[in-house]
Image: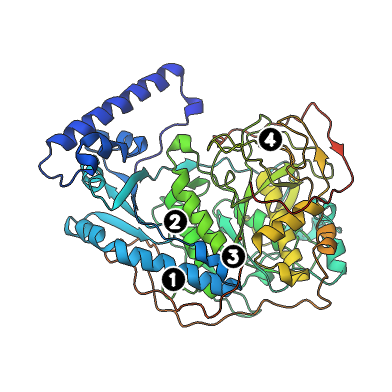
């Protein structure tokens, strides 16, 4: 596949100007080619300019000189998920959303898939967004753009995520089994998670998902908490998916049949969510919760297709071979550290549809605000910019001072001026599991270290206050209202919330005590049962048929809800933060 274009931040002014002229010239050439081609059928609006406007500049640039590129054919007819709010339970929401999306894809994708099959064009069908991933030439893109059932043609660029790397401290092999600490990790302590444990709530009944570089599932601090491990046997069906199908030289290979971590980052974030080896390494927020995982990055390289494939799998996990999707096995919370800059060719709208489909199904998506601070409006890439994503900034661990690298709002990339991040958590010098061995640990710093603190805090909240489970807006309001507000006018009003700290530093004990009456005994979320026929899950093998019949209708109604990566700086704000007593604002609508 064609590699992604260089970041606009690394291009010289002359090169940027030349590239811009090249894209303009390519558009003109495309219009001319479309206008003169005998193979092109109907034209939207009857002219080539409208057709060209449906094709993203990234696609035009990466199909120059007869080259092939991967691009999404996004259909005009997208599913309406607004009625998902009328279903009470997560199981019913998930079944409804899955059925609705599948119905739409099945009803609309057939003619395009047949057209592609007849021309032997590589293709991959998605339903979480009604779209088809195609590998083809500019002429193929132009012909597809003439169709009235096609809304737009978007690129599938390769994105180099700026993931944190291990710091000076790094325990490996046998050393870590001797040198482990004897205390709970400082970041976990600072959130007051141990105080919630003392009340009897450690995340029982909650499943969290890692969307990352994978997970070393056999790690001593992770294996006991893997949903696919019963203490004696491993069952990876419904608990693991690998969206990497075309890597070269990756240590995990392609389509790994069991959880594997090719970089260490995913094991680290999973550890902060749930990690505990029972021998002193208390690295996780919710050690009684379970985890599942989907690898959406080849080391640090992601694509929109990989991101969307994992989001689709979370919506309805499948067996390892991709069969028998089951929405009742969806995770409660997903943890995300990836980003997808529009400047690199990502389609913010296409990714947003996938994020919002998860939310409609009752899945809480927690995402790093990213590491492009300390400037304002540096929260500018999906998924951290979205209202449907609970975005997390990083504090210097043990303090209420924002980390210099933590991205700030307001969000100007989409014109919303949305306040981001939503909340902050410890994110520097964080010790957690690593992938060198089953007993290795490493220190990392980044907003992706803060994010699993929030994912774990939500697991504790839902364990302690079951009435909040899968009530996404109410749960966010509960955490926000209980946070320790930290005033800052660096990027706008002091708040709460503000564009540096969001609603402030998470305090999970205050959230549990203020979110309702905690259950006296932790209880697991009931698992709904359903007979669900097989449906397509993206695989390395192209699909040629539309998605099959959807899952059963839910049984009962009810009601509820871009920075380009840079090196992590070490600077801190010049304005000292002012910590005030915890506010109790009224629940706010999502910005």
Q: How is the image coloured?
A: rainbow
- Determine whether the residue tagged by mark 1 lies in a helix, strand or loop: helix
Q: Residue furthest left?
A: 38
- Determine whether the residue tagged by mark 3 lies in a helix, strand or loop: loop
Are circles 3 and 1 on residues that touch, CB within 8 Å?
A: no
Residue nearest the viewer, comparing 470 with 297: 470
Callout 4: 10 Å neighbours few (<14), some, many (20+)? Answer: many
- Separation (CA) of disc 3 from disc 2: 26 Å
Upstream in sequence: badge 3 or badge 2: 2
Upstream in sequence: badge 3 or badge 1: 1
Instruction: Tell me the mark number nearer the camera, choosing from 3 and 2.
Output: 3
Compared across the picture, whether 3 is left or right of 60 comes to right
Instruction: Tell me the mark number nearer the camera, choosing from 4 and 2.
Output: 4
What residue does disc 3 label?
362
Residue 125: x and y in percent read 34, 60
Q: Residue furthest right?
A: 581
Upstream in sequence: badge 1 or badge 2: 1
What residue does disc 1 label?
99
State the mark number for residue 17.
none
State the mark number for residue 244.
2
Residue 104: x and y in percent read 37, 64
């Amino acid at each position: 596949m064609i590699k992604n274009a260089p970041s606009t931040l690394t291009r010289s002014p002359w090169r940027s100007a030349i590239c811009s002229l090249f894209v303009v010239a390519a558009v003109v050439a495309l219009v001319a080619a479309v206008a003169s081609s005998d193979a092109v059928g109907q034209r939207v609006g009857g002219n080539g300019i409208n057709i060209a406007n449906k094709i993203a500049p990234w696609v035009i640039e990466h199909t120059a000189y007869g080259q092939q590129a991967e691009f999404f054919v996004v259909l005009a007819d997208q599913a309406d998920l607004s009625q998902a709010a009328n279903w009470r339970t997560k199981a019913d929401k998930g079944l409804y959303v899955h059925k609705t999306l599948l119905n739409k894809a099945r009803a609309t994708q057939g003619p395009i898939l047949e057209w592609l099959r007849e021309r032997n064009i590589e293709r991959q069908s998605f339903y979480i967004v009604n779209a088809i991933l195609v590998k083809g030439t500019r002429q193929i893109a132009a012909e597809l753009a003439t169709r009235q059932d096609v809304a737009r043609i978007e690129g599938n660029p390769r994105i180099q995520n700026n993931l944190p790397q291990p710091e000076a401290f790094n325990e490996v092999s046998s050393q870590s089994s001797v040198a482990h600490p004897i205390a709970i990790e400082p970041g976990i302590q600072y959130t007051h998670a141990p105080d919630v444990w003392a009340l009897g709530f450690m995340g029982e009944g909650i499943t969290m998902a890692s969307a990352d570089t994978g997970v070393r599932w056999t790690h001593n601090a992770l294996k006991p908490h893997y949903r696919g491990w019963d203490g004696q046997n491993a069952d990876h069906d419904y608990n693991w998916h690998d969206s990497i199908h075309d890597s070269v030289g990756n240590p995990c290979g392609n389509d790994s049949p069991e959880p594997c971590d090719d970089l260490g980052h995913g094991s680290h974030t999973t550890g902060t969510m749930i990690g505990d080896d029972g021998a002193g390494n208390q690295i996780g927020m919710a050690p009684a919760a379970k985890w599942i995982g989907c690898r959406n990055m080849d080391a640090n390289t992601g694509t929109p297709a990989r991101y969307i494939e994992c989001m689709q799998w979370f919506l309805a996990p499948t067996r390892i071979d991709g069969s028998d999707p089951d929405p009742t096995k969806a995770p409660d919370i997903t943890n995300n550290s990836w980003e997808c800059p529009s400047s690199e060719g990502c389609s913010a709208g296409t990714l947003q549809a996938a994020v919002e489909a998860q939310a409609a199904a009752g899945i809480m998506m927690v995402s790093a605000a990213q590491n492009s601070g300390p400037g304002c409006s540096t929260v500018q890439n999906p998924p951290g910019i979205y209202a449907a994503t609970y975005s997390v900034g990083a504090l210097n661990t043990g303090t209420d001072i924002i980390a210099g690298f933590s991205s700030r709002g307001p969000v100007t990339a989409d014109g919303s001026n949305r306040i981001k991040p939503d909340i902050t958590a410890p994110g520097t010098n964080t010790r957690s599991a690593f992938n060198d061995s089953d007993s290795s640990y490493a220190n990392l710093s980044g907003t992706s270290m803060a994010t699993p603190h929030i994912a774990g805090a939500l697991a504790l909240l839902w364990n302690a206050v079951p009435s909040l489970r899968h009530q996404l807006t109410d749960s966010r309001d509960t955490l926000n209202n209980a946070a320790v507000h930290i005033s800052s006018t660096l990027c706008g009003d002091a708040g709460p919330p503000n564009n540096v700290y969001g609603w402030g530093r998470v305090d999970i004990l205050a959230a549990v005590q203020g979110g309702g009456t905690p259950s006296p005994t932790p209880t697991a979320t009931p698992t709904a049962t359903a007979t669900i026929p097989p449906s397509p899950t993206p695989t390395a093998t192209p699909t040629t048929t539309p998605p099959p019949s959807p899952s059963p209708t839910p049984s009962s109604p009810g009601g509820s809800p871009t920075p380009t990566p840079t090196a992590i700086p070490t600077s801190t704000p010049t304005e000292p933060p002012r910590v005030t007593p915890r506010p109790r604002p009224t629940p706010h609508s999502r910005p």
